[in-house]
Image (cartoon, rainbow, N blue to C red):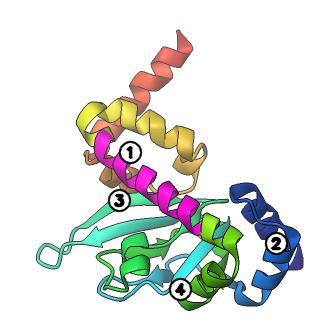
Amino acid sequence: MAESSNIVFEYLKSFAPLNDKDINDSQPFWKARKMNKGDFFNMQSMVCNDLGLIVKGIFRIYYRDPETKEDKNIFFFSENQFVVSFRSFVSRNACWYFIEAMEDSEIFFISYQDLNSLYETHPNWGKFGRLLAETFFFAAQTRTEEFIFFSHEQRYIRLLEAHPDIVNRIPAYHISSYLGITNPSLSRIRKRIESKKAQ
């Protein structure tokens, strides 16, 4: 995991203006975790206590309707992305979603308490917190706007741009749930895109 930790800290330095001292002082707080497919990073109705950075794997955030038991995928996170229920993490209120590993995965994570300790003692980690908040605000607003302004096909293309190999890594019905369409509709979209490429 030593090689993975180096990857993590290099990514953190590229994400925010963190110097070597900032990274070194934070190292004791970051913990490695290997997760199996189907393991939960966080559960619905529980407070999200950790911020994770994905080294390997893909996760979904989904809501389970307590009455119909239907799952609705909201976000996917993959390598070099942070995984967290940000509202719950910041507000310390119960999470509305499940966060599940969709394949065997590896993450590094830091607790809310430790991250806030870094915010208080290291100005550059405070900047990291602002950039993190901006990242998740951007993701949430973009997700909302996609449903207003983009067609199903456009949303599918944008998903592939964000996660290029996702169709080879997770079952199609999870993508259908994310797009808010049926499996047959997804098949038609994929066929249309393939036929356009062939022209």
**Mark 4 crowdedness (10 Å alpha carbons): few <14, some 14-19, many ≥20:** some
Q: Estimate the x, y position of residue 39 in percent, counting from the top left.
A: 51, 82
Q: What is the distance, in whole Å, between disc 4 and disc 3 at their CAs?
A: 23 Å
Quarter of the figure with the N terminus: bottom right
Q: Callout 4: helix, strand or loop?
A: helix
Residue 155: image quadrant is top left
Comes first in the chain, label 1 or label 2: 2
Residue 90: say if magenta.
Answer: no
Q: Is residue 130 left or right of residue 18?
A: left
Q: Is residue 12 left or right of residue 72?
A: right
Q: Are marks 4 and 3 in contact (CB under 8 Å)?
A: no
Q: Which mark is residue 112?
A: 4
Q: Which residue is mark 3?
A: 74
Q: Estimate the x, y position of residue 57 in percent, counting from the top left.
A: 63, 66
**As shown in the figure, which amino acid type bears the numbered disc 3?**
Ile
Q: Is residue 22 left or right of residue 103?
A: right
Q: Nearer the viewer, mark 4 or mark 3?
A: 4
| Magenta span dominant secondary structure | helix
Residue 18, placed above or below residue 26: above
Residue 96: image quadrant is bottom left
Residue 143: say if magenta.
Answer: yes
